[in-house]
Image (tube, rainbow, N blue to C red):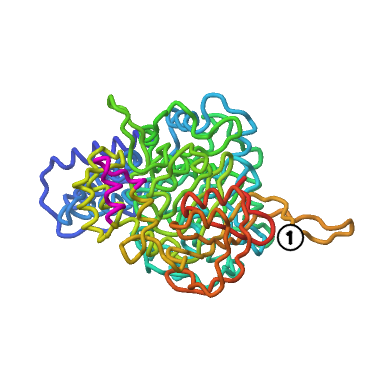
Amino acid sequence: MADQQEEEDLRMALRMSMQNLPPEPKRSKPREAAGSPATTTPEESRRLQRELLAAAAEKRMLAAAKSTPSSSLPSKNEGSGGLRMKEAEIKAKEVNLDNELSEEEAYQLFSMVFGSSVSKDILAQWSNQGIRFSPDPETSMGLVQHEGGPCGVLATIQAFVLKYILFFPDELSKVAANMPQSMHSRRLSKTQCVVSDNFAAFSEDTKARALVKSMGEILFLCGNNKRAVIATLSVISNGIEGSEDNPKDVIIAQALEGLSIESAFDLQKVLRVDTYMTPTSAFKRLEAMIPVFQSRMGALLFLISALLSRGLDCVQADRDDPSLPLVTAPFGHASQEIVNLLLCGQAVPNVFDGRMDLGGGMFLKGISTSVEVGFLTLLESLNFCKVGQNLKCPKWPIWVVGSESHYTVLFALDTAVQDENELEERESQIRKAFDAQDQSGGGGFISVEGFHHVLRETNIRLPSEKLDRLCSSGFIVWSEFWQVILDLDKSLGGLKDSSGQMGRKIFELYHFNGIAKSDLNGSQATPGGETPVQRPRLTKLRVSVPPRWSPEEFMANLVVPPGSAGSESSGKDTEVPKPEPPPQHAPLVDCIRTRWHRAVCNWVGDPPSIV
């Protein structure tokens, strides 16, 4: 009936528009009577014509906005009906509300995430993990994980949350509408340092704002900074108003009672999908829907939001093998494609820089741009992959850490941990000059003529016997040249330093594992004895990176002799404790060494766990 009435209104408006009545200077008041007289004056006809046209146009425009926002806006001289159209169209451009997935979209989304055959255990893992902060005071800045599987989603959100609470604390005191849209490209200071590691001091409001901004930034990153799609539940479509007698958590738990997602039909039935074109509108929606993302469906809803923000077809185009599900069998872990999507906005499967050309028009896709927070993996230490500089050296000293079955987070409080020291800068300079003369396509050797050019450019003065030996074969190999440089005194342009401290770095890292496990260091006294506390794990590590020119001394674990020069920490000389604590080892140390070669780590208490 509504559609028939709309068509009738439009036909009447079109008939009246043929009367060529003179224009009216201003709009009359709305009609008070429901009907209109059989005989109308010219003034009433004009008024009725405008109102019918405006009403019909608004209805059609709002319906069309759900598929594609219009690209043209009426000018001011088109009358008040045109102005009403303009206001509605601007609103449609800002947010596309209350959409449901089509059957085709729901099927594509479900099969893309879980595949054609998925176990109920995996579905349960992903349907029972909220995005919630730990209630434990010592780890209260961290997101806690109770189910296996969604750790890749939680760890990536956690990395962005740490970026905000550590390096943008002032921004968290501002309302969401004032958030700079270009914040993700900003670096405040080369040597910015957080003065305290009292993570329990962050208020609930601060953490909530950090979570909202992190989720919003990730979704707009996936949407190419043009849009964010937010997937929520149709049973909880609006903001949740709780009370002391009826808290929000209880309201949501009751609404989710009996709700499960086991098929594409379930997805279509329970999802509400809203598209936001501006950060302001998206952040407001996320802020209102935080209780939903904290519910047991939170991790899955955020993954779906990221995939829809990217666009399902774009996600499939990003991948090397789109036939495989994004959630991997048999344990339901998040794939590298999911983690990369949340880190860089593209669901590429590899961690190297750029792309690898395999010939014949075939290539593998990696990370094409720099990122806010990075990625390290145990698999690199096992020679299964090579993490590129884009992920290894992010803008902020925060890394998602991958193992064979879990994702955790490594971070520093000082951005200077990524600054090159004197030795690293010198190495980069020499290597850049050498590579510029390498005509072998990356083979690592250059001509004698090119070698002399490198020596001049880098101001290296080799003794005649070493120069003759390197040039005797007619070409110079990088590995042989580098060994000579390591053994060449600093005064001659080499890297050997008699003090034994050139290039030495000492700094602190923190490792967070969000999965709740028994903490032997946090046991509580009970009548039956001590019971380990179930909570996430936060470990502080002291990292010492010895000089690269002394591998033999490093392997021998020699103690730095008393009276030697101070170490380099964050670009400043500080006193090295004597004697050095004995090195400790855990799989996390192998991950750290993919970023800082030969790093020696120490910690207090239980070893950090990446599983």
Query: Can residue 175 be seen from the camera position used here?
Result: no
Q: Which residue type carries mark 1? A: Gly
The image quadrant where one finds the N terminus is top left
- Residue 39 part of the magenta segment: no
Residue at 58% from the left image edge and 61% from the top image edge: 541
Q: Is residue 453 above or below residue 336?
A: below
Badge 1 marks a residue whose secondary structure is strand
Q: Residue furthest front?
A: 465
Residue span colored magenta: 464-480
Q: Position of residue 582 (x, y in %)?
A: 63, 60
- For this view, does 519 lie left or right of residue 354? right
Q: Along the horizontal axis of the image, is 514 left or right of 114?
A: right
| Residue 530, x across and y down, in percent | 83, 58
Q: Does the magenta stretch include residue 467?
A: yes
Residue at 48% from the left image edge and 73% from the top image edge: 565
Considering every residue shown, the one lying at the far right of the view is 527
Percent of width and height locating residue 271: 50, 39
Query: From the viewer's perspective, is residue 191 above or below residue 320?
Result: below
Taking depth in this image into account, of 7 and 487 the one nearest to the observer is 487
Q: Is residue 406 something one can see in this rendering? A: yes
- Image position of 229 with respect to 169: above or below: above
Q: Which residue is drawn at 45% across and 63% down?
A: 417
